[in-house]
Amino acid sequence: MANPLKKAAVYLGLADEEFEYEEPAPVVAPVPVPPRAERAPVVPLRKSAPSRQAVPEMNEILTVHPRQYKDAQAIAEAFREGIPVVINLSQMNDGDARRLIDFASGLSQGLLGKIERVTNKVFLLSPSHIAISGDPAVAASDESSLFAQA
């Protein structure tokens, strides 16, 4: 009795109720589930820190003067090869410079490197096998920073 008009007529006594019989569904025997196959080996995502013997000798530092955000690709390619990158943002507008530094921060975190500010608009991306020494208070003391959080 799927018809709503017929239901209303039965309710008001204008029609007789007709019973619909459904035939029972045939019983289906359950299908046996095959045993699970062996699981694939799990490969950890995080690489271990590179050993001192496997680290190539550093003989190059790349300096980049990006003008647009699309110049980030050259920075990423060099950093993936283990080359330290100096990024000079003096030729970029503030919005694109912030996007580029956000990208470089993610890149350095993803590849276990470091990012450090050298001056107001100059940053150093260094791979994990490169040790950086210097006075961090000098870069942090610049109050008129482009990237100072308020």
Image: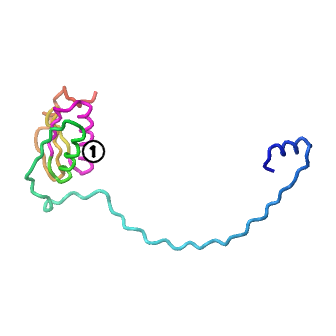
70 relative to 39 in the view: left or right: left
15 relative to 123 in the view: left or right: right
Residue 45, position in %: x, y? 31, 57
Q: How many marks?
A: 1
Numbered disc 1: secondary structure: helix
Amino acid at dot 1: Gly
37 relative to 24 in the view: left or right: left
Q: Residue at x 15, y 45 (%)?
A: 85
Q: Residues within 10 Å of mark 1 (few under 14, many from 20)?
A: some
| Placement of 139 over or under 39, stated as above or below | above
Q: Residue at x 26, y 58 (%)?
A: 47
Residue 51, position in %: x, y? 17, 60
Residue 145, position in %: x, y? 20, 29
The quarter of the picture where residue 143 lies is top left
Q: Magenta stretch containing residue 107, yes or no?
A: yes
**Which residue occupies the foreground of this view, 142 or 76?**
76
Residue beneath label 1, please? Answer: 106
Q: Residue at x 21, y 52 (%)?
A: 80
Q: Magenta stretch containing residue 140, yes or no?
A: no
Q: Residue at x 14, y 41 (%)?
A: 64
| Placement of 57 over or under 33, stated as above or below | above
Residue 9, position in %: x, y? 87, 43
Q: In the image, which residues are magenta? A: 85-113
82 relative to 31 in the view: left or right: left
For the C terminus, the image quarter is top left
**Residue furthest to the left:** 59
What kind of colouring is applied to the model shown?
A: rainbow
**Which residue occupies the foreground of this view, 27 or 109?**
27
